Image (spheres, rainbow, N blue to C red):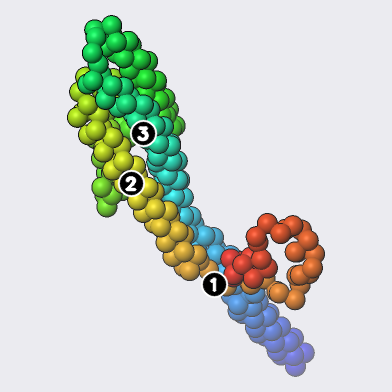
Amino acid sequence: MKISNIESRDSSAKNALQAKTQNSTTSAKTSPQIKTSQKEISKVESLSKKNDTFEPLAISVKNANLTIGSLDVMIDTIKTLQIQNKDFSKLATKFQKVATQDKAQHIIKQADVIKGEMKQTFDSAMFENENVFSKNYESLIPESKLNTNKITSPKTLDVKQIENLKQYANDLDTQKKYAKEAKKILQHKVEETLAKTTQSTDSSFEKVDLSKLNTQEFKAAQSGRGITLDRVMSLLH
């Protein structure tokens, strides 16, 4: 009888131990800590995918901004060339009416000085160690009509050929117009791309609580530089 009781107690203990082990295993499978870890892994994977998207975007925006900088230099350079070309053309007009050889030589010398200044203006139109008139804009802005081949070095200009100077003036004016248009195209592309990217970002980010902002202190901090609270909040949202 005593042996039977001992065996019964041993059997009960074994059953209890097995049940405890099973409960422990089940608990481990549903552990909140494991769930959290899986969530964090998913988060990291999501961020990694976003980085794969944002990295080429950043490069694209950077290239666009560099091209805009190049176009700015081009526009300013063309403006200077236009002023210089007007002075050159005035001398060409005088040359057509010159009466003596001495006066003709004097005009030619004056024209050579201006042509040298124009050449220096053209050659110094650099951005990121590259002359802005030798850059290939067609591959970057296929929609643009900009053709830098139309703006050749002023070294080919001749005070004796007034018609060529008129054509050069027309080319400068036309390409300046196209350069401005190309700049607007790029700016629009950048703004459009950034807007789409902003819309596609994780909507789970919390929006700023307007009640936490001190309107008076904010206005004082921005010192009337044209920034409004509504504008900032629209950007943050």
Q: Quadrant of the N terminus?
A: bottom right
> What is the number of the mark on residue 203?
1
Cα gap from disc 2 to disc 1, whole angstroms: 41 Å
Check disc 2 and give the amino acid type: Lys
Q: What element does badge 1 sit on?
A: loop
Query: On residue 82, which mark appears?
Result: 3
Q: Report which residue position mark 2 lands on.
A: 177
Q: In the image, which disc is placed on residue 174?
A: none
Q: Residues within 10 Å of mark 1 (few under 14, many from 20)?
A: few
Kindly report which numbered mark, 2 or 1, lies closer to the viewer in this rendering. 2
Judged from the image, the secondary structure of the residue bearing numbered disc 3 is helix
Q: CA distance from mark 3 to mark 1?
A: 51 Å
Picture quadrant of residue 22: bottom right
Counting other residues with Cα less than 10 Å from the Cα at mark 2, is it few (<14), some (14-19), or many (20 or more)?
some
User: Mark 3 is on which residue type?
Assistant: Gln
Nearest to the eye among marks 3 and 1: give it. Answer: 3
The quarter of the displayed image where residue 65 is located: top left
Q: Earlier in the sequence, mark 3 or mark 2?
A: 3
Could you tell me the amino acid type at mark 1? Ser
Q: Position of residue 124 (x, y in %)?
A: 42, 25
- Which callout, 2 or 1, points at the residue further toward the start of the chain? 2
Give the image location of residue 24, x and y in percent. 65, 77
Question: In the rendered structure, are the residues bearing label 3 and label 1 in contact, judged by CB atoms less than 8 Å apart?
Answer: no
